[in-house]
Amino acid sequence: MAKDNILVGLEIGTSKVCVVVGESKPDGPIKILGVGQAPSCGIRKGEIVDFENVHKCVREAIADAEDKSDVTIKSVFAGVTGSHIQSFNNRGCVNLPEDREEIDMDDCEDVAISARDVSIPQQNAFLHTILQHYYVDGQEGVLNPVSMLGRMLEADFHIIHGVGNRIRNTVRCVKELGIEVEDVVFNGYASAQAILSQQQKDIGAMVIDIGGGTTDYVVYIDGAVKQSGVLAIGGDHITNDISMGLRIPMAKSERLKIEEGDATLGNALPGETIFLKDETGFAGRDVERETLNTIIHFRLREVFELLKRSMDGEPYLPMLGAGIVITGGCSMMRGIGPLAQDVFGIPASVARSKATSGLIAAAENPQFSTAIGLLRYGQAAYANRPQKEGIKEFLGKLFGKR
Ligand SMILES: Nc1ncnc2c1ncn2[C@@H]1O[C@H](COP(=O)(O)OP(=O)(O)OP(=O)(O)O)[C@@H](O)[C@H]1O
Ligand SMILES: [Mg+2]
């Protein structure tokens, strides 16, 4: 983090590139100074498919953010997603040498390395090794083992990894603009930092960020991340379904979805229609409201059912005291909360990022949850490891210990 405490979050999303510039006060709220945006091109299902075009969009969004915030951007925390992102839980173990009985910081790092000592696909790189719980000589509930006496340190971790080159492409795209990447962060994990309070994490919550091309999710139980992942389905699939199902051009379908759509079945009056005006290349006509809502309902139901199925065999669902929390652009769809509640059988709500100072309006847009969460991630990373440079952490992730 620069001396002036500036943090920048960058999400290269399927629908938009978003850059949030914030000012971090130690242990205080982040003040949002400006938000830059550009429509995305060259991204499919959260992944870069046309490097040159993505590069242009990122440049545009960065320039917009610099303009709005009056800050020259030197480095960013960058979000990544895509169906290549995978995760698992594992326990690490370290035995202290005979001549030492006090646990130190290096042991904490070694226990994380030990947890990563599993085979992942050759082309993959570790993205996150997120601490769940420590154990000292079998004692549970240890919050911070440093300076404690013990012979054996163990710890459970949630480990997230993905295809190294796909992650590096995001980094290269930013670096070619002369901007450093301080760290790369899974989008779902970033969004969770923006919308969940510590209390919600403690009593259990599942965050679902539904964007244009992906649905990213993270499950917190007892304050720790237990599960995370990506579905390559998002709001653009709904638009596509409307376009195909009702034979309407994509741009018109997108507008119809946003302005008139509702995920609730049976909400329309019998025979109720929406009139679509004629425009060049499109003869105006009526669309049945219930048909539109049915298309939206079934695509979103599919997303929630797939997520629920991913929790099959895990005991987590009844442990989510704070329920399901939905964010991302698609969370603005009418009726989405009750639909999620119906599928999961537990309370579900729609959320945007928690109050920050500065441009409060930015925090109110759920499309910015990932980028704002990246600022929170950055603030916490610096608070926890003030003596380290972020970029070194990041390089370690991608090129160092696998
Ligand atoms: N008011 C609204 N109602 C319903 N859907 C909306 C609304 N506003 C935006 N969306 C949808 O939200 C999606 C974009 O969300 P978002 O900006 O979070 O995606 P993204 O971050 O660019 O993509 P991803 O994270 O999937 O790579 C689009 O599919 C868009 O149609
Ligand atoms: Mg997104």
Image: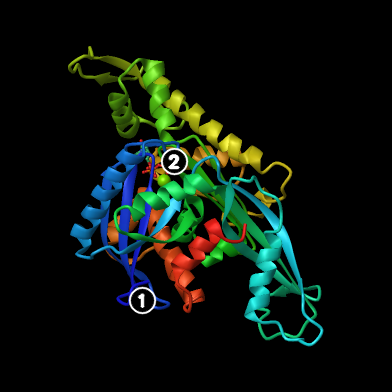
Q: Nearer the viewer, residue 195 or 144?
A: 144
Q: Residue at x 48, y 67 (%)?
A: 392
Q: Is residue 17 above or below residue 35?
A: above
Residue for point 42% across, 59% down: 374
Closer to the camera in the image, 165 or 341:
165
Q: Which residue is mark 2?
A: 46
Residue 321: which quarter of the image?
bottom right
From what the image shows, is residue 310 above or below residue 352?
above
Q: Earlier in the sequence, mark 2 or mark 1?
A: 1
Tag 2: Cα neighbours inside 10 Å, few (<14), some, or many (≥20)? many
Left or right: 189, with 5 as reference point: right
Q: Where is mark 1, residue-wise?
A: 25
- Residue 145 image point, x, y percent: 68, 79
Up the image or down, 210 lies above or below 77; here it is above
**For the residue with label 2, is its CB less than 8 Å from the closest atom of ligand 1?**
yes
Considering the numbered disc 1 on the image, is that residue within a helix, a strand or a loop?
Answer: loop
The C terminus lies in which quarter of the figure? bottom right
The picture quadrant where one finds residue 45 is top left
Which residue appears at 47% of the width and 39% of the height? 214
Nearer to us of marks 2 and 1 is: 2
